[in-house]
Each structure stands twice: as structure tokens, then as C-alpha cells.
């Protein structure tokens, strides 16, 4: 260990912080280990590039072995939890604390990863308490953008304050699936939540609160509260196609349809609010495209 800045009760254990390169040739800090971290045999061997001090993380044999990235607080606390993650990964706060969330038990990475530029606001808890997930590049950016969610996210989606806050798989299974070349929405299995690329973006709550399954295509649900709470407390078949629900509150009213109704919005539909109820042309289950789903 090369003059690593270390907090209290850290780096305890055989070779816990060996070969941790903390200071570069220009005396710049490369690793800053906070309190109660890197405890166990080889917990932080060869760690690099984590310049933001982290606390209560990397506790377990080989937990952060050769981790080269940015580490959050309260994360990677089990054997080999984060040893597989690629260089320049960002681990959010309170994440990757059991085998299978971020790395397999044999140390190989899961298919689920955090892409470049994703979850890049640690201080804002953008991905804290995230369950097993694949986050595409440039996604889950903003205050609690993907907080307390369980999902896969495509590229450049879920951007904004609480954009995909508590988006989860349907009842009985805590898993959501967002993007990555999703199939035509008619073929989705029940209980899944899928959101395509360039979707669920807005200043606040674009797709938040969808706890029981949600299918969103590409370039949809962009706007404040555009699809907020769409499936909260309802059934899991609700579907929004490509290029739909792109304005503030565009499809917000559909959350009120109740448990017994499965609402679908086809492609290229409901991208503006109707001036009054008589102007709504959306028909549930119809082919569209439609101009309006909800009133202003």
C-alpha cells in the first residue's frame, strides 16, 4: 500500500490493502479509503481510481480485489462482491452487497453491469438500493433517478430527478427490464417492466412509482410525470409503444384506470394533452395512432 489515505477501522486483515495504488507520480490521490472499509483478506488488493472517499464498503474476502473505479458508501460487502466489475465502473451507494447482484460466485461478471456514464451522481443516490440490474450507458442520472429499483435500463434513459424511482418488476417478482432491443410489446411476458432507449427522461418523476410491471418502448414517456405511477396498484399488462407519451403529464391519467383494466398506448400516440375530455381520442386496445390520452 502506497501512502493510501485510510480512515478508522479500515484495511484490517491479511493483505487487505496490498498493492493499492493511491498516489500517482504527480502526488495526486488515486484511492481514498474512508472508515470501516476494506476489512478481510485481500479485500482491496490492487484497488485504484476510487478518488472519492467511501465508508462502510468492500468488507469481505476479495470484495473489491483489483477494483478500478468509483466506489459508493455501504457497498460491496461480501466475498468477491465487486471483484469482477470492469475498469471505470461506478458502484452506487448501498449496492452489490450479495453474491449474484453484481458478480457471480465464481468472480465472473453477471450480464448485468453499469455502463459508461451511468449512475454518475453518487452524492444524489441515483442508483442506491438498486437490485440486480443492467444499466446502459448514460442512464439513471439525477437525484434518486433509479433509487430502490430492480430493472435493466437501456441507453440514455431514466434521466432526471426520480425519473425511474421504484420502477420494479410486477407483483411477486422484483425484477424490471428496461431497453436493450426489446421485442414488440405484444410478446412481453406478464409481470415484466421494460423501458426502451431514450425514454423516461424529465426534470422530475417521468416514470417513477411503477411497482407492478411496465412496458415502455423507445423514445417514450419523456416529460415531467409523463408516465408516473402508470401501473401503481394495477395489473401488469399496461404497455406504452415507441414515440408515445412525450409531454408533461401526457399519460399520467392512465394510472387511475384501476386494477381490472390493462391500458395500452400504441406507437406515435398521446404526445400532447387534450384541451378537454371531449377531445380525447385514445381508445384502449386500439391501433392508433392517437393524439390525446389525458386532458390538461
Image (cartoon, helix red, strand yellow):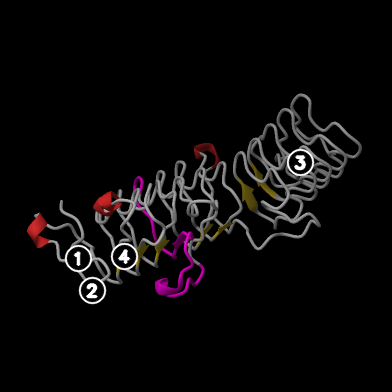
User: Who comes first in sequence, dot 3 or dot 4?
Assistant: 3
Determine which residue is flagged by label 3: 23
Residue 264 is tagged as 4
Residue at 30% in and 51% down: 258
On the rendered image, what quadrant is the N terminus found in?
A: top right
The percent coordinates of residue 251 (x first, y second) are 26, 56
C-alpha distance separating marks 3 and 4:
55 Å
53 above or below 126?
Answer: above
Residue at the top extreme, as displayed: 8
Determine which residue is flagged by label 1: 282
User: Who comes first in sequence, dot 2 or dot 4?
Assistant: 4
User: Who comes first in sequence, dot 1 or dot 3?
Assistant: 3
**Residue density around tag 4, few if under 14, some if 14–19, many if 20 or more, within 10 Å:** many
* Residue depth check, mark 3 versus mark 4: number of the one nearer the observer: 4
The percent coordinates of residue 41 (x first, y second) are 88, 40
Determine which residue is flagged by label 2: 288
C-alpha distance separating marks 2 and 4:
10 Å
User: Who comes first in sequence, dot 2 or dot 3?
Assistant: 3
Tell me which segment is drawn in magenta. Answer: 180-205
Amino acid at each position: 500500500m502506497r501512502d493510501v489515505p485510510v480512515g478508522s477501522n479500515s484495511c484490517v486483515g491479511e493483505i487487505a490493502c496490498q498493492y493499492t495504488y493511491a498516489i500517482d507520480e504527480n502526488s495526486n490521490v488515486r484511492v481514498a479509503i474512508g472508515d470501516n472499509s476494506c476489512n478481510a483478506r485481500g479485500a482491496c488488493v490492487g484497488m485504484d481510481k476510487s478518488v472519492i472517499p467511501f465508508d462502510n464498503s468492500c468488507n469481505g474476502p476479495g470484495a473489491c480485489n483489483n477494483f478500478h473505479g468509483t466506489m459508493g458508501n455501504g457497498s460491496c460487502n461480501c466475498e468477491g462482491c465487486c471483484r469482477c466489475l470492469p475498469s471505470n465502473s461506478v458502484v452506487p451507494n448501498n449496492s452489490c452487497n450479495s453474491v449474484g447482484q453484481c458478480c457471480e460466485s465464481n468472480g465472473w461478471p453477471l450480464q448485468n453491469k453499469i455502463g459508461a456514464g451511468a449512475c454518475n451522481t453518487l452524492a444524489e443516490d441515483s442508483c442506491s438500493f438498486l437490485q440486480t440490474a443492467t444499466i446502459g450507458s448514460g442512464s439513471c442520472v439525477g437525484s434518486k433517478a433509479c433509487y430502490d429499483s430492480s430493472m435493466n435500463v437501456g441507453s440514455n434513459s431514466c434521466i432526471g430527478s426520480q425519473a425511474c424511482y421504484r420502477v420494479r418488476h410486477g407483483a411477486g417478482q422484483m425484477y424490471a427490464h428496461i431497453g436493450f432491443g426489446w421485442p414488440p410489446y405484444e410478446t412481453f411476458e406478464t409481470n415484466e417492466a421494460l423501458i426502451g432507449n431514450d425514454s423516461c427522461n424529465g426534470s422530475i418523476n417521468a416514470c417513477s412509482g411503477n411497482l407492478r410491471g411496465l412496458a415502455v418502448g423507445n423514445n417514450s414517456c419523456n416529460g415531467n410525470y409523463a408516465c408516473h405511477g402508470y401501473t401503481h396498484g394495477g395489473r401488469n399488462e399496461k404497455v406504452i409503444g415507441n414515440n408515445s407519451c412525450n409531454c408533461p403529464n401526457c399519460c399520467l391519467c392512465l394510472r387511475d384506470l384501476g386494477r381490472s383494466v390493462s391500458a395500452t398506448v400504441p406507437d406515435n400516440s398521446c404526445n400532447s394533452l387534450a384541451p378537454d375530455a371531449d377531445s380525447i381520442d385514445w381508445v384502449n386496445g386500439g391501433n392508433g395512432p392517437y393524439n390525446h390520452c389525458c386532458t390538461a
